[in-house]
Amino acid sequence: MNAQKCSLLVVDDEPYILPMLTALLAAEFEVYTADCAEAAQAVFARHSIDVVLTDLRMPRQTGIELLEWVRQHYPRTVRLLMTGYAELEDTIDAINRGQVYHYLLKPWRTEYLLQIVRNAAEKRLLERSRDQLLEQLRQLNSDLEQRVLERTRALQEANLLLEQRARELEHLALTDPLTGLLNRRAMEELARFELKRHARYPGSLTIGLIDIDRFKEINTHYLLPGGDEALRGLARILTTSLREVDSVGRIGGDEFLIIARETNEEGAKRLAERIRATVAATPIPYGSQVIHISVSVSFAVAEIDAAVDFDTMYRVAASAIKDAKDKGRNCFSVSRVSTLLTQNKSLV
């Protein structure tokens, strides 16, 4: 079909009407013809019809019945009805059943007929243009929704990646890279938090220090890689020696910090001895060799009614570990931190 022409189906059972209308309309329309409703339905099955012009009275099936069928099956086709019988009842029936666009009377004036068919074709072209615009708009909306969806998904993925990177950076900022334990910053923040909680909800709290005995000699004998393996081995031993509620971290060199929650003086002594004995009895594999180490352990125990800060606890633990080393190493020392000690510190 010519892209510039609308398709027109003319249906009439009078033989002279079809060639006459074809000759009249072929210059402006792609004309198809049928001599009955059944033949017209066959044309609809083979071609896309923009406008149908049918006679009212035909054998077997009337023009109104045909237009009603067209309305049900091809609602976009513009429907025209022509008749030589101007009866009001037929007009009403055509409008109600076939929903005709225009009702023509025979005989018609040529210019009037052409104008009616042109108007019907223009109506169909406008509807087609509207449908195309609506389809384009629907497609644009669909494309926009897809782009928004893709953009939203990309933003969500980017946000998840940023959150993951932020968590990784936070983990790196709080983790000792050699042992995988918490680092000094993380342990001090955690200790200060626990001491604040201790002040609000009185209970036993123990903070301890662990030093590897003669660590310089280990580095000298096994070189720095051996010293690093000794630190990693000690980290594993400490992790398995503590309860799940306790925390351990490496705060520098060969020094480790322990936070033992709800642990009183007796509990601190048992924990210190368990750590000391476990470390002494556990050789650390290093290549084809093993490294034997011992540790000095010190604990500062905050009494239930002692409002203490981290600096005080750390100072007491550091003093206690000096005592342990002075005693010959491979031993522990436990000190209590009382309110009186804290008050004396504030007066100095």
Image (cartoon, rainbow, N blue to C red):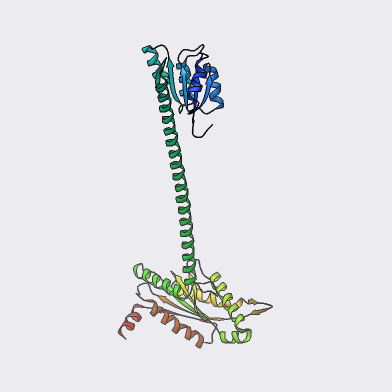
Q: Nearer the viewer, residue 212 or 20?
A: 20
Q: Is residue 129 visible?
A: yes
Percent across and percent down for residue 244 are: 50, 66
Q: Nearer the viewer, residue 91 or 107?
A: 107
- Residue 20, given in percent of the width and then of the height, sits at 50, 19
Tell me the residue at 38%/74% (across/down): 303
Residue toward you, 189 or 320: 189
Check the picture and name the quadrant holding the C terminus.
bottom left
Q: Residue furthest right?
A: 288
In the rendered image, the vertical position of residue 121 relative to residue 191, given as above or below: above
Q: Nearer the viewer, residue 18 or 51?
A: 18
Residue 214 visible at all: no
Residue 128 placement (x, y as % from top left):
45, 34
* The N terminus - image quarter: top right
Tally the marks. 0
Percent across and percent down for residue 208 are 46, 77
Left or right: residue 201 versus residue 253 is left
Which residue sits at x=45%, y=45%? 140
